[in-house]
Amino acid sequence: PGVNLAGECSVAELLAVLRGSRVTVGNDSGPVHLASALGVPTVAIFGPTSVDWTAPRGASVRIVRGEAPCAPCFKRECPQGSAECLLNVSVDEVYHAASLAMEENAGEKG
């Protein structure tokens, strides 16, 4: 089962949790960058930020993004009022990316 630890742990505790994770799923933020640096399978969800500029790197990283003509705009709040770039990311896309990342990681370890 998934666990939401937003605001619940220190950076040191977060690193310990990430190190033991089968997969990390998150938006373009610090935890996905930390997870990828640790070699944890990572799914990074992009909306208003740029995959080219700010995506985490690594063999175990998968990117999911919602296409929108205005993205990337780098705005915290959608100037269009629609957040189309995030609404165009489906749960199925994220689930599929996470499943593939875990399968690939299991193959490397097994």
Image (cartoon, rainbow, N blue to C red):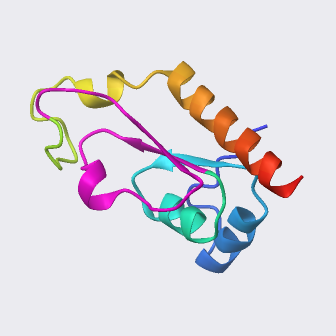
Residue at (34, 21) in percent of width and height: 88
In depth, the one of 29 and 109 nearer the eye is: 109
Q: Give the left or right position of residue 3, taking residue 75 as reference.
A: right
Residue at (17, 37) in percent of width and height: 71
Q: Give the left or right position of residue 80, taking residue 90 as reference.
A: left
User: Which percent across, then down, holds residue 110?
Assistant: 90, 52
Image quarter for residue 63? top left
Residue 45 on the magenta span: yes
Residue 72 on the magenta span: no
Asked if residue 95 is positioned above or below residue 60 in the image, the reply reads above
In depth, the one of 21 and 103 nearer the eye is: 103
Residue at (81, 47) in percent of width and height: 106
Image quarter for residue 25? top right
Question: Can you see residue 83?
Answer: no
User: Which percent across, then down, holds residue 47?
Assistant: 30, 38
Residue at (66, 60) in percent of width and height: 40
Q: Which residue is farthest bottom?
A: 12
Q: Which residue is farthest right?
A: 110
Q: Give the left or right position of residue 72, taking residue 97 as reference.
A: left
Q: Give the left or right position of residue 49, taking residue 19 as reference.
A: left
Asked if residue 60 is positioned above or below residue 80 in the image, the reply reads below
Question: Can you see residue 9?
Answer: yes
Image quarter for residue 13? bottom right
Count how many numbered circles sit on residues in the image: 0
Quarter of the image that includes the N terminus: top right
User: Which percent across, then down, holds residue 36?
Assistant: 56, 63
Q: Magenta residues? A: 42-70
